[in-house]
Image (cartoon, coloured by chain):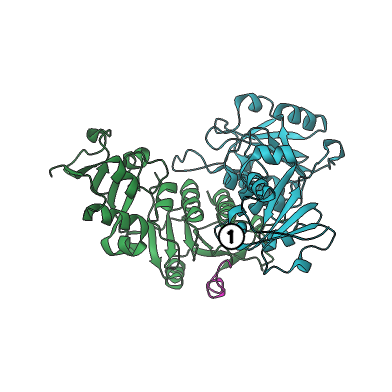
Chain colours: A cyan, B green
């Protein structure tokens, strides 16, 4: 495909990229999202790129190995479509990955993470990254979660290679995991069971919830185990990404 | 003291409050910092307030019980000095607390947290809050850390009541803790010792380091124990507040 040069922020391709940065609805409708920055774009590996957009100083050969559309833009245009304060001059329009639930492998000691209604992009990014670090096999995000393809989440999860299912109905998901003999474990401030006293000796799915309200009552009722982290000083609760990380750590060392 | 009303952003008191919001140097020089928002200001408890600043709709009696200066400002002036996008119309100029190292109590199973060169205000806030939740007795911040009185850190640590020592020389601090028979434990990606295999059966100080570079080599050399968190998928490292939380959790359950 021939390279293009675009020098106006009014160009429809440029306008659409800005839409993809800003609007979940545009990302959903087009099945595309934006990855930005030298390291993140270099790290795309198996992901399918639709278009690269770069400023003149970027070396095309370092990024664009196949017959993918390469668009050169002015620094002004790049700033207009960049989500960062100090743009690095390279971004890619990437096809969203579609994972099939049917192909998911359930191993004896698999760990899964189910995320219900987490709203903060920073929290979701940290959650996903930490889950990857603890060998979680797959992540399920409820339809009410912040968008996985939000630029802040994309930045935080750079290099993470793991199936993430979006727009999940939590109740269906839990039923399906239970059928595969996975123990459903929810965090619950009302329980008397401390995390460190739990045994995790087979497949586990950890369910974590919204920043302010935790896991919904409806979802708690579906759980096999309710756990909480032992705390002092009457601190109400830990940040959701901190609490989840501690649970995953404990499940992982009890299970590996 | 008589109440005042200020309607101009050019008033020197207003200009100084903005300085206190924005500049560590101003906070250091004046020994003052800003606490903002209804809940945070209600939560000040034992902290000494120099001045309250509020918009007209705020009920003075709910906040200002003693003979403290109360300044009413216009919404425009409040927005000018507020650090938040949706100001709640109340802030307090607060005296920094001075903790004396000599008065610090070292109990048999005390846990301390030593923070070396953490740069992100969000990370420091989460670290302090989590440490409080795990019953840490005191926190020591190296002089190169982000300012404890940065508005973002102040917001994140609302309600936390625990001695935090700032501008600490890490090496002096570690020597002093060792004299009190406290085990110095650093996070180190190069070690072979996993956190879950460590025993913590007396006082422990956990030392954590900078987001990009971890704990300095110089500080690692002073440690009694070097630990790392067992991870998978070749993830280089966890976020500093996540890693610290997991270490504190493990120390806490091994030590309580």
Residue nearest the viewer, comparing A198 with A17: A17
Count of number-bearing discs: 1
Which residue is at 79% across, 43% downward? A110
Query: Residue at 43% of width from left, 69% of height from top?
Result: B179
On screen, residue A171 above or below A12? above
- Per the rendered image, the range of residues in magenta is B213-223
Relative to A54, B35 lies left or right = left
Which residue: 31% across, 43% down? Answer: B76
Question: Residue A56 in the image: x percent, y percent?
Answer: 68, 67
Looking at the picture, tell me which residue is in the foreground, B248 or A65. Answer: A65
Residue A240 in which image quadrant: top right
Q: Magenta segment, principal secondary structure? A: loop
Say what secondary structure mark 1 lies in: helix
Is residue B109 visible in the rendered image? The answer is no
Q: Is residue B207 left or right of residue A225?
A: left
> Quarter of the image holding residue B103?
bottom left
Q: Position of residue B70 (x, y in %)?
A: 20, 43
Q: Is residue A1 magenta?
A: no
Chain bearing tag 1 is: A
- x, y (%) of residue B131? 48, 51
Q: Residue at x 60, y 28 (%)?
A: A216
Find disc 1 in the rendering and name its residue.
A76
Q: Is residue A32 left or right of residue B221?
A: right
Disc 1: CA contacts within 10 A as few (<14), some (14-19) or many (>=20): few
Magenta stretch containing residue B214, yes or no?
yes
> From this viewpoint, is residue A213 visible?
yes
Can you say whether A112 is above or below B26 in the image? above
Closest to the observer, A247 or B69: B69
Query: In what quadrant of the picture does the N terminus of chain B appear?
Result: top left
> Horizontally, is A209 left or right of B84 in the view?
right
Q: Position of residue A27 (x, y in %)?
A: 69, 41
């Amino acid at each position: 495909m021939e390279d293009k040069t675009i020098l106006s922020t009014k160009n429809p391709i440029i306008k659409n990229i800005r839409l993809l940065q800003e609007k979940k609805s545009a990302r959903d409708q087009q099945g595309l999202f934006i990855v930005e920055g030298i390291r993140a774009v270099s790290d795309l590996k198996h992901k399918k790129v639709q278009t690269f957009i770069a400023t003149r100083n970027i070396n095309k050969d370092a990024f664009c190995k196949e017959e993918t559309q390469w668009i050169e833009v002015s620094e002004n245009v790049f700033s207009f479509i960049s989500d960062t304060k100090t743009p690095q001059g390279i971004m890619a329009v990437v096809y969203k990955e579609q994972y099939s639930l049917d192909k998911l492998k359930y191993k004896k000691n698999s760990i899964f993470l189910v995320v219900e209604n987490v709203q903060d992009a920073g929290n979701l990014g940290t959650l996903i990254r930490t889950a990857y670090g603890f060998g979680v096999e797959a992540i399920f995000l409820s339809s009410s979660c912040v968008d996985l393809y939000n630029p802040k989440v994309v930045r935080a999860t750079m290099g993470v290679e793991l199936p993430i299912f979006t727009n999940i109905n939590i109740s269906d998901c839990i039923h399906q995991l239970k059928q595969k003999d996975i123990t459903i474990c929810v965090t619950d401030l009302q329980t008397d069971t401390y995390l460190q006293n739990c045994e995790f000796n087979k497949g586990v799915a950890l369910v974590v919830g919204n920043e302010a309200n935790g896991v919904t009552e409806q979802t708690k009722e579906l759980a096999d185990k309710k756990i909480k982290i032992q705390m002092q000083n009457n601190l109400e609760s830990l940040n959701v990404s901190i609490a989840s990380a501690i649970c995953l750590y404990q499940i992982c060392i009890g299970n590996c």
